[in-house]
Image (tube, rainbow, N blue to C red):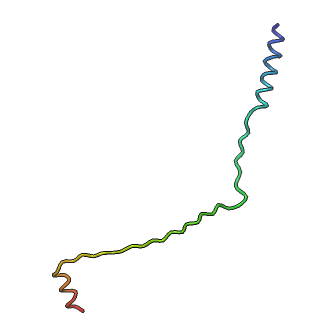
Amino acid sequence: MRTLNAAFSLLLLLMLTGCTPRIEVAAPKEPITINMNVKIEHDINIKADKEVEALLKDRQ
């Protein structure tokens, strides 16, 4: 009986090791490309005092 349990355990162990998943990490064959079509627009608004505006106009 003991031999039968040992044989069954060994058979079960062999069957379970055959079902082990395989994980593989590999680099892609083609390089990774990232297309970034971005349009950037910006506005700069400067607010000045009336005295500063008058000084700037006088300098021109």
Left of 41 or right of it: where is 44? left
Q: Could you tell me how many numbered marks the image carries? A: 0
Residue under the image location 54 percent in, 69 percent down: 37
Rendered-image quadrant of the C terminus? bottom left
**Image coords of residue 47 (percent x, y):** 24, 75
**Image coords of residue 52 (percent x, y):** 19, 81
Left of 1 or right of it: where is 42? left
Residue 17, above or below 27: above
Residue under the image location 74 percent in, 33 percent down: 20
Left of 41 or right of it: where is 5? right
Q: Quadrant of residue 5?
A: top right
| Residue most extreme to the top | 1
Residue 8, above or below 16: above
**Image coords of residue 42 (percent x, y):** 39, 73
Q: Quadrant of residue 41?
A: bottom left
Residue under the image location 71 percent in, 61 percent down: 30
Residue under the image location 18 percent in, 77 percent down: 49
| Residue most extreme to the bottom | 60
Residue 38, above or below 21: below
Rendered-image quadrant of the N terminus? top right
Residue 21, above or below 49: above
**Image coords of residue 26 (percent x, y):** 71, 51
